[in-house]
Image (cartoon, coloured by chain):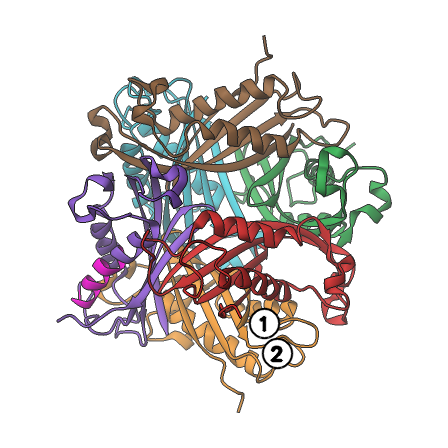
Chain colours: A purple, B red, C brown, D orange, E cyan, F green
Amino acid sequence: MYAVTVSDHFMIAHSFRGTLFGPAQALHGATYAVEAELRRPALDANGVVCDIGRAMTALREVLAAFDYRNLDAEPDFAGINTTTEFLAAEIHRRLAARAAAGDLGPDTAGRLVALKVTLRESPRAWASFEGPIAAAA
Amino acid sequence: MYAVTVSDHFMIAHSFRGTLFGPAQALHGATYAVEAELRRPALDANGVVCDIGRAMTALREVLAAFDYRNLDAEPDFAGINTTTEFLAAEIHRRLAARAAAGDLGPDTAGRLVALKVTLRESPRAWASFEGPIAAAA
Amino acid sequence: MYAVTVSDHFMIAHSFRGTLFGPAQALHGATYAVEAELRRPALDANGVVCDIGRAMTALREVLAAFDYRNLDAEPDFAGINTTTEFLAAEIHRRLAARAAAGDLGPDTAGRLVALKVTLRESPRAWASFEGPIAAAA
Amino acid sequence: MYAVTVSDHFMIAHSFRGTLFGPAQALHGATYAVEAELRRPALDANGVVCDIGRAMTALREVLAAFDYRNLDAEPDFAGINTTTEFLAAEIHRRLAARAAAGDLGPDTAGRLVALKVTLRESPRAWASFEGPIAAAA
Amino acid sequence: MYAVTVSDHFMIAHSFRGTLFGPAQALHGATYAVEAELRRPALDANGVVCDIGRAMTALREVLAAFDYRNLDAEPDFAGINTTTEFLAAEIHRRLAARAAAGDLGPDTAGRLVALKVTLRESPRAWASFEGPIAAAA
Amino acid sequence: MYAVTVSDHFMIAHSFRGTLFGPAQALHGATYAVEAELRRPALDANGVVCDIGRAMTALREVLAAFDYRNLDAEPDFAGINTTTEFLAAEIHRRLAARAAAGDLGPDTAGRLVALKVTLRESPRAWASFEGPIAAAA
């Protein structure tokens, strides 16, 4: 199996509900360093998994919906704890949809089989969500 | 699949038996930077894989049994080469037992399915052990 | 010149005033990975620059006043852009005062001559403030 | 499953054919930081996955065929885009053949089951190829 | 003293003349991870050393003259060994000229006093050039 | 000022005397990741600070006197706490002597002016010693 990973980062504010979170129940924030790993069983005619430029652009566009935001004020996330795990899955959902639609380069629709999204929140902790890239409906 | 990783480190002395080890047959030591990746198919009601604070505490308590020790003098390891691979598996066994017992947060017993423990011994080499978190008996 | 560096991190929310900041004028946040480098011309009788355990504790205590906070709501920072540069200098001021007072170990008062505080806000940008450790009045 | 990873790097020149590559169609180059992860279900009598010294030597010997070369001028790669993905698979093929032949230490032939080769081309992008280590014919 | 660092990277081909360089006399290449550290004694009215967005843009524009090039074919470098050290100094010269001209934000001309440019060529070696930012003529 | 840095690592056992050291009074060990930064005001005729291959070799030879040793048993260090700070200064002394003697390449004797040696003992702490390279007697 081949894989290509592109990385970027975004910076948000948020707070968590639940005594489990201790001091993180207060409004605080995070820099998330993001890695998106795209997997494909065979290379295309150019010898690549996908167009790495398009992959970086697609990741940036997905992250732009989060970057420099207070996630507590985003309607999409009303009533949701925007934990690192949740955000990894949400970014996976959005980037996988683009990958399924063929946005990551010629000859990629239906050929990129899986995506792993990792969000590093500090030098000591990170989270990821890994799952298939479903065929676009 | 979701995953959360917490990291820490410990510092030990040890030596190895066997000509394979060359100069490492002499008493020397290592700093091991440790990463423990916990996997779970779905998030809990708080939106997390586990309580990250408890995960860090549990990892620290497991590592405390090794930290600042000469492993050659530990009864647990008599007659054993405490290689990076061996230590990764040993830390996996101890931390997985805690995870299986529900020590990593409410609603985690039986729900954390796998653990990967990585030990970085130098900028040029590292080892890991990955396996299921078995249900506590 | 000898130097010892200890590292830690903290997570905050804030916003900036001024068109220069573009999208960072909105409430967002950051994880700051912090490095505090303490300098001393000669080692003490133990062979160290300072007690590294005490240095880590002092840094943690200084950072605790920022960690998991919305800096926009902190009276100390009313009317101030809490930029990475500003925070580096503020942490320098607070940690240097502790160093000058001898909080970093026996035989350190008056002997630690300089401190550099670096705050990494993302994989692509960081800031620092470097200056002398003034003798305590 | 146990795994041991060794790392090294190499520096090459090359160019790509295909408009997909944009400015990378011109002759340029890269430093590839390489990680080779070897997997084995059980440790040998010494307590290791393989002889780490031999693994480092084998990886270096494989990389020596690429290091300080213009890949456009290598007969092996005539008509091929030597992308990061392609090189990861090529290094996998060569190192896996050595592993299958027992070159990575006593008692390794037939026991190392899989290899993942990762090539980091920049702080923002990397690629890997992962596959079984086939038994030597 | 305050400092802000921005980072980027570029990828080039080149060769060296001189037996000192051994195998690097052949055409090969490198990824250079670049860090540009800008120093200023006091912050501006916004609380920053400079406009970090402009600093990243200026660094990118300076690197664009090198990126995806064969430096052996660049008229600017005819007869020159484009070593890591040389390139660090050349990027310093070009970026310092922009800094001196006030390109890095309002209120920066004449106030940014020094620049350190570091080029990382591999995980095992890097080079830097550090010097004043001279006032623009 | 130009600088070139080469890196390597070594692994040792040791213990410390003094209640300041707490649990580190027991025999333990460390991996030290080492960086040696060599400074020179002007490049040589080849365009380099020194022969980077020779610098790496010299650093390796200096570290070989420590690597895979129990420093408590080394006559050179009898009665000495081999702290990270002490080891940084000791490696500085030995490598600076080689640099002063012209071991780091043609045209280097008397031209390399300063050396900074950094030892990283864990992801959370490191130490350095920085000083001039004195002319060889």
Residue that lies at the very extreme toward the bottom in this rendered image? D137
- Tag shown at residue A22: none
**Callout 1 and callout 2 share a chain:** yes
* x, y percent for residue F82: 75, 40
Q: Which residue is mark 1?
A: D58
> In which chain is the residue bearing label 2?
D
Circle 1 sits in a helix, a strand or a loop, which is it?
helix
Give the camera-side residue of B12 and D4.
B12
Residue D67 seen in the current view: no
Tags 1 and 2 in contact by the CB under 8 Å rule? Answer: yes
Taking the magenta stretch, the answer to whether it contains residue D33 is no
Taking the magenta stretch, the answer to whether it contains residue A93 is yes
Q: Within the image, what quadrant is residue E135 found in?
A: top left
Q: Which residue is mark 2?
A: D103
User: What residue appears at the point 55 percent right and 78 percent down from the top-left corner?
Assistant: D112
> In which chain is the residue bearing label 1?
D
Circle 2 sits in a helix, a strand or a loop, which is it?
loop
Q: Is residue D97 above or below residue B129?
A: below
- Between the C-alphas of marks 1 and 2, the distance is 8 Å
Q: Which residues are magenta?
A: A91-102
- Locate residue F20 relative to residue D128 in the image: left or right: right
User: What residue appears at the point 66 percent right and 53 percent down from the top-left corner?
Assistant: B65
* x, y percent for residue D100: 55, 82
